[in-house]
Image (cartoon, grey):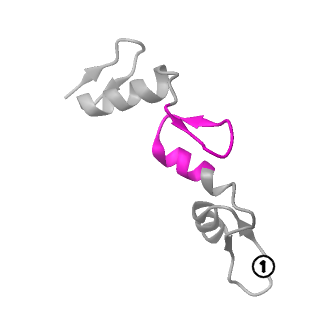
Amino acid sequence: NRVPCALCDMVCTSVSSLKAHITFRHCDECPFHCHLCDSSFKNAYDLHKQVETHNDSDAYSCDVDGCGFTSWTLQTLRQHYKRA
């Protein structure tokens, strides 16, 4: 269950994890393009996070009284809740 990368010293546990490793570490191709700016990404999730930043207003806000924290992404709000 050890699949070595031919491009570096990384050893993966499966062929699928090796493919992901090569895509993110050794490949410069970014086929997912933002239709609102010139940014492009290696996967659809990162593109989705980018598109969320183009909202005209802050879409997510902390509901704790007196906090006032706002963010463009739900993930950032969740990180805020973990820290606060």
Magenta span of residues = 31-50
**Residue 52 or residue 4, whichever sits in front:** 52
The location of residue 75, given as percent across then percent down, is 57, 61
27 sits to left or right of 81: left
Residue 74, given in percent of the width and then of the height, sits at 59, 65
Q: Residue at the top extreme?
A: 6
Q: Residue furthest left?
A: 1
Taking the spot 47% from the left edge, 39% from the top edge, the residue there is 43
Residue that carries the numbered disc 1 in the rendered image: 67
Q: Is residue 11 left or right of residue 34?
A: left
As drawn, 23 above or below 44? above
Number of marks in the image? 1
Q: Nearer the viewer, residue 54 or 69?
A: 54
The residue drawn where x is 58% and y is 52% is: 49
Q: Residue furthest front?
A: 35
**Element class at badge 1:** loop
Look at the image and tell me in which quarter the N terminus lies.
top left
In the rendered view, tell whether residue 38 sits above or below residue 84. Answer: above
Q: Position of residue 51 (x, y in %)?
A: 61, 52
Query: What is the three-letter code of the residue carrying label 1?
Result: Cys
> Which residue is rendered at x = 47% and y = 29% of the image?
24
Q: Position of residue 31 (x, y in %)?
A: 49, 31
